Each structure stands twice: as structure tokens, then as C-alpha cells.
Image: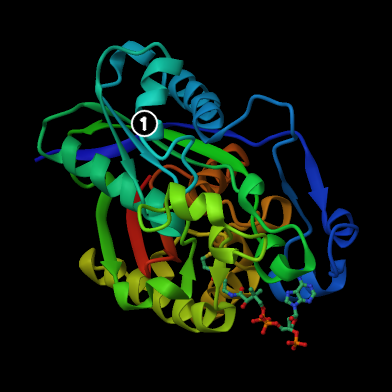
Amino acid sequence: MYNSKIIGLGKYVPENVVTNEDLSKMMDTNDAWIQERTGIQERRWIKEGTDDTSAIMGAKASRMAIERSGLTKDDIDFIVFATMTPDYYFPGCGVQIQDLLDMKNVGAIDIRNQCSGFVYAISVADQFIKTGMYKNVLVVGAEYHSNGLDKTTRGRGVTVIFGDGAGACVLSREEDNTKGILSTHLHSEGKYADKLIVESPSIKHWVPQILESKEEDLSYFPYMDGTFVFKHAVVRFSEVIIEGLIKNGLNKEDIDMLIPHQANLRIAQFIQKKFALRDDQVFNNIQKYGNTTAASVIIALTEAWEEGKIKPGGNVVLAAFGSGFTWASAIIKW
Ligand code: COA
């Protein structure tokens, strides 16, 4: 069995910055409410008329990750793409990456696990490398939320939270099994699917229903029972981090960098306090990007690395919770 390690990281966010002030011109909200409840100051939303989509942003982040890895696109053996906002109902975005990057006819799959999508995707890639089946896997997380949000006061409880963006990494074979991804931990609890959901379009809500759909049909917009999700998030985040630490014989003092999914700054601060971590041991960038769902962990990891906050030999913990419910962690020896 091999381990896998991250050898290249990349990200892409659209240029268009949307501040809380900008949102307050579209709906009844304000900067104070958004910052106090979520920590978000601004987010990126793809500007109408530009070419960006989840796949295209994912391709831009992938090019950066591959270049930084020192490999070429022809060295990549497999693509794993996490998104809840794919360009098409089918096929998934993974095959678009194969095309956009003009890669060999390698396999490509999509992961549909929302906020924990990237940690799930890394875990899937890790298994292929562990078994020796593939040597280099490209793992991508990207979301184009802004085109699917209710930008009226009706949708304010959800819309102010989400942003667009993409991140990617190259995962590669590591012969030393004390290094790289040490373990991943995946969970789900489907009975709460309806607490954070976009119901349509779906095969249950297809062309006849779409044609008859009225403006008041909210099934096309994300629905979230925010308080319920928040309460579960703080518990599951903690559990899955502890599970990863125990598996590797580590204590909370051994965490050098925690990269939590960027759902809400209050959740990250709660976890930081619970694990008694210093500010420099937890990386947050929700202030700039909002919640980019499957892209959030990889954008944050990329920025933490770019800022020199991830040191060789350090213990890096990725953790996420979201719709499904699903939650996951990864323990990495950098
Ligand atoms: N601007 C101003 N007021 C708003 C608002 C906005 N954007 N959105 C909601 N409100 C109002 C509500 O209408 C409500 O008003 P009322 O008391 O008169 O009915 C009030 O603010 C409180 O709303 P509530 O939804 O209870 O707020 P909250 O404190 O629970 O915060 C979230 C909302 C979404 C920030 C919070 O619940 C959250 O972060 N949940 C978890 C998100 C998460 O972890 N997601 C995981 C993966 S995506």
C-alpha cells in the first residue's frame, strides 16, 4: 500500500467582488447582520457575460495546480471533480476537465457531496493511489452558485452566504507511509437531507412541472434550516476531527493547521475554542469568499500554503460538514 501526498495546489475565483453593501441594494439585508452572523464581508460572483462556469473555473485552478506540481497534464492518471453546481445535469464536470485541459483519455468522476465534497473527493483519490492503481490524480472542487440563488429578500437567509470559485490539487504516490494523507473519515445521515436542499430541477420535477412552474415555486432555490444545520455542524465537525486524531495517535495539541470548510466564521471559531487552537492554527478566508461549498476547503488550503502557513512535517487537518448531511475529515502529514 502506498500513501498519497499533495504535490501541487491551485485556485481560481472570479474577479467580480460582491460586497455586503452591494447585496443590501438587492434585498433587505445589511453589512452588520451578515458580518455578525457569518463573518462574511464579500464574495465573488461570476459576472454575467463572462465565460466562467464550474468546469471552466475548475480547469483554471487545475492548470495552476498541475504547473505547481512540476508534472504535466499528460502525467495525470485520473480526475475527481466535486461540485453541487455542475454545468450540466449530465455529464459531470470531470469529463469537461479532461477536454478543457486536452488530457489523455483518463477516467473522470464527479462527487456529489456538497460542502464536504472536496474532502470526500480527496479520500476517493487517495484510495486509487493507495492501491497502486493510479500514481497522479487531479482533484478539483468548484461551484457556480450565484446563478442559482434567490436574490430577493425572500432568499436572504441563504443567498448572502454563498460565493463562486474553484480549487484543485494534484495528489501523487508517496512511498513513505508516515507522510502524506494519513487517513480520511467519511460520514452521512440522510434523514436530514431536507434540512439543506435544492429540490429542483430533478427527475421528480422535470419538463412538465418546469413548464407549469410559477414564480412562487421555491424548489429551484437552496433551502436551509440554518439553526438546525448550525447545531449539527458544530457537533459533527468536532467528532470527525477527534476521530481522525485518535486514528493516528495524535492529540489536539498536535494540530499545526486546521482548514475547516468555510460555512460560517462562528462555526470555525467554536471549533477553534473547543480544540484550544491559536489563531495561527486555524485558517479562515470566508470573509473574502463566503461559502464556496465543494471549493471552500481546497481554496483555503491553497491560500494557507501560498501564505507559507503550511510547513513541511506539519499535521494538517481538513474537516467539513454540509448537506446530506455529510461530514468528513482528512489528516495529512505535510
Ligand atoms: N439579512 C438580514 N436579516 C436576515 C437575513 C439577512 N441576510 N437572513 C435572515 N435574516 C433574519 C431572519 O429573517 C430572522 O428574522 P426574524 O427573527 O424577524 O424572523 C433573523 O434574521 C434570524 O434568522 P436566523 O435564520 O434564525 O439566523 P441565524 O442566527 O440562525 O443565522 C445563518 C443564519 C444561516 C447564518 C446560520 O443559521 C448558519 O450559519 N447556519 C449554518 C450554516 C452552515 O453551517 N451550513 C453548512 C453547510 S452550507
Relative horizontal placement of residue 265, taking residue 175 as reference (left or right): right
Identity of the residue drawn at 72% across and 75% down: 37
Which percent across, then down, holds residue 184?
A: 27, 56
Report the label total. Answer: 1
Relative horizontal placement of residue 40, taking residue 83 as reference (left or right): right
Which percent across, then down, holds residue 263?
A: 57, 64
Relative horizontal placement of residue 2, taking residue 228 as reference (left or right): left
Identity of the residue drawn at 48% across and 79% down: 234
Which percent across, then down, holds residue 86?
A: 46, 40
Q: Secondary structure at mark 1?
A: helix
Which residue is at the front of the view, 231 or 133?
231
**Ligand 1 sits in quadrant:** bottom right
Question: Which corner quadrant holds the N terminus?
Answer: top left
Which residue is at the front of the view, 73 or 334?
73
Identity of the residue drawn at 55% across and 25% down: 60
Q: Which residue is mark 1?
A: 94
In the rendered view, tell whether residue 150 sits above or below residue 225: above
Question: Which corner quadrant holds the C terminus?
Answer: top left
